[in-house]
Amino acid sequence: MDTAAGVLASRPPQVTGTKAVRVEIKGRVQGVGFRDWTMENAQELGLCGWVRNRRNGSVEALFSGDSASVEEIVEKRCRIGPPAAAVTAVASFPSDEDPGQGFECRFTL
């Protein structure tokens, strides 16, 4: 705001920047196509990273890319998942891990 003139100065739109988060998804998320569904959604949103099953029954993923797209997959899409899934919890943590190029499915850990 230009206070001297009492006029609002127009601001350019803010760029959202990039973001990387590691996510753990719990519930009925294995054996329901969650990893393939995650890969399709991440690719649709232009994200890099990976997804894998965990031996504890959860699914873990690393999402990296445009902040708005990362928020979309974590806060909206992963909380619902594919039709056969029943998500009970989604926890996300900031990450500085290198996501690599593209999005891949990794072996169970």
Image (cartoon, rainbow, N blue to C red):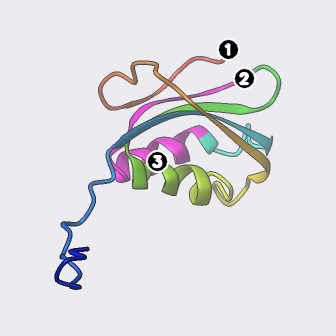
**Total label count?**
3
In primary-sequence order, the first of circles 1 and 2 is 2
Q: Give the range drawn in magenta.
A: 35-53
Task: Determine which residue is flagged by label 3.
Answer: 70
Marks 1/2: CA–CA distance: 5 Å
- For the C terminus, which image quadrant? top right
Residue depth check, mark 2 versus mark 3: number of the one nearer the observer: 3
Seen from the viewer's position, the closer of residues 78 and 91 is: 91
Q: Neighbour class for label 2 at 10 Å: few (<14), some, many (≥20)?
A: some
Drawn side of residue 46 relative to residue 77, left or right: left
Drawn side of residue 56 relative to residue 9, left or right: right
Drawn side of residue 27 relative to residue 90, left or right: right
Q: Is residue 69 visible?
A: yes
Q: Which amino acid does label 3 sit on?
A: Val
Q: Neighbour class for label 1 at 10 Å: few (<14), some, many (≥20)?
A: few
Q: Is residue 37 highlighted in magenta? A: yes
The location of residue 83, given as percent across then percent down, is 68, 60
- Classify mark 1: helix, strand or loop: loop
Q: Residue at x 65, y 54 (%)?
A: 81
Seen from the viewer's position, the closer of residues 32 and 87 is: 87
The location of residue 13, given as percent across then percent down, is 23, 66
- Classify mark 3: helix, strand or loop: helix
In primary-sequence order, the first of circles 1 and 3 is 3
Residue depth check, mark 1 versus mark 3: number of the one nearer the observer: 3
Task: Determine which residue is flagged by label 1.
Answer: 109
Q: What residue type is labelled 2?
A: Arg
Q: Do the residues labelled 1 and 2 touch (CB within 8 Å)?
A: yes
Task: Determine which residue is flagged by label 2.
Answer: 54
